[in-house]
């Protein structure tokens, strides 16, 4: 599964609220979650919010690039088995234990959606821990022992928490001025006609506030003896809570099927 690449649409973003950030604690999107709901009320860093519908230009230290976030969306990555032994099915009535101390390598097929040059600009511009490289997680947002179910095998699964940020960019050419003579130093400046683009999006993992790893959700999942994932309605409450239905249908990030989706 490929996370969508950069999306540049023709229409103008309908919402362009300017909410300069005073402190990260002021951000109403600090606990973004995974509901898939688009948020247009997230606080923005000073200098990185739209002014009359345009993202202010960046300077030479920003490689003459700038990004202004307009909306942010949190959602679940694809469901994956926890490392053994927690991710190995247990016999009915024997709940598996999950060790939360070990680092888990995430295999989500991540596609940041922006060039390497712009990735650094996104990281500096958005009001959350943005990373195009972190691929392991130790943070636990949700964990509970599986229900001792007499009929079904169980195993632990997890989902990386993802975030998509969308907004506008501004770019100019960066020019290095030549320098001659002893003691002179090279200088850079932004030149040329600015280029503005709207609805530029990038998807990355949600990173824990201590920057140690990816935020993740954990839950037990029920399976039949032959390894078939049981229907969502037969899953334990912890699984349903971690991966709720969306508009009455199963979340595509989750492997438990729904009867009405078939």
Image (spheres, grey):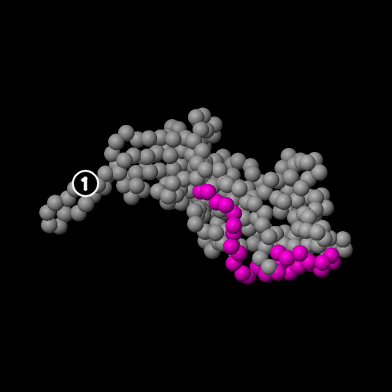
In this view, the residue farthest toward the top is 11
Between 83 and 19, which is closer to the camera in this rendering?
Answer: 83
Give the percent coordinates (x, y) of residue 254. 70, 50
Between 244 and 1, which is closer to the camera in this rendering?
Answer: 1
- Horizontally, is 190 left or right of 250 in the view? left
- Horizontally, is 163 left or right of 230 in the view? left
User: Which residue is rendered at x = 79% and y = 50% of the image?
Assistant: 232
In this view, the residue farthest toward the left is 181
Q: Is residue 227 above or below residue 44?
A: below
Give the percent coordinates (x, y) of residue 86. 71, 67
Q: Which quarter of the rendering shows the C terminus? A: top right
User: Which residue is rendered at x = 78% and y = 66% of the image?
Assistant: 90
Give the percent coordinates (x, y) of residue 69. 49, 42
Considering the whole magenta stretch, tell me its main secondary structure.
loop
- Horizontally, is 46 left or right of 108 in the view? left
Provide the residue span drawn in magenta. Answer: 85-112
Q: How many marks?
A: 1
Q: Is residue 229 above or below residue 98?
A: above
The image quadrant that residue 42 belongs to is: top right
The image quadrant that residue 159 belongs to is: bottom right
User: Which residue is rendered at x = 57% and y = 47% of the image?
Assistant: 2
User: Which residue is rendered at x = 21% and y = 46% of the image?
Assistant: 177
Give the percent coordinates (x, y) of residue 36. 64, 44
Q: Is residue 67 magenta?
A: no
Q: Which residue is mark 1?
A: 177
Q: Is residue 90 magenta?
A: yes
Specify whether residue 61 is in view: yes
Graded by Cα atoms within 10 Å as few (under 14), some (14 to 19) or many (20 or more), the crowding at tag 1 reads few
Q: Is residue 164 above or below residue 108?
A: above
In this view, the residue farthest toward the right is 150
Is disc 1 placed on a helix, strand or loop?
strand
Specify whether residue 46 is in view: no
């Amino acid at each position: 599964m490929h996370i969508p690449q950069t999306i540049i649409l023709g229409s103008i973003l309908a919402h362009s609220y300017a909410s300069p950030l005073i402190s990260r604690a002021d951000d109403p999107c600090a606990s973004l979650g995974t509901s898939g709901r688009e948020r247009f009320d997230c606080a923005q860093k000073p200098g990185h919010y739209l002014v009359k519908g345009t993202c202010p230009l960046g300077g030479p230290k920003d490689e003459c690039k700038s990004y202004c976030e307009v909306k942010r969306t949190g959602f679940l990555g694809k469901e994956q088995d926890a490392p053994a032994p927690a991710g190995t099915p247990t016999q009915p009535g024997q709940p598996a234990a999950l060790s939360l101390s070990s680092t888990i390598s995430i295999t989500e097929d991540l596609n940041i959606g922006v060039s390497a040059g712009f990735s650094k600009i996104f990281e500096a511009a958005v009001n959350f821990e943005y990373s195009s490289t972190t691929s392991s997680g130790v943070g636990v947002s949700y964990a509970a022992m599986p229900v001792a179910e007499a009929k079904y095998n169980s195993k632990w699964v997890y989902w990386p928490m993802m975030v998509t940020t969308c907004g506008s960019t501004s770019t100019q050419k960066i020019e290095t001025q030549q320098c001659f003579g002893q003691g002179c130093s090279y200088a850079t400046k932004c030149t040329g006609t600015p280029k503005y683009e709207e609805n530029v999006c990038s998807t990355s993992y949600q990173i824990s506030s201590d920057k140690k790893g990816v935020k993740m959700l954990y839950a037990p999942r029920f399976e039949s003896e032959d390894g078939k994932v049981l229907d969502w309605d037969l899953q334990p409450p912890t699984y349903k809570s971690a991966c709720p239905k969306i508009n009455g249908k199963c979340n595509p990030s989750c492997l438990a099927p729904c009867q009405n989706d078939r």
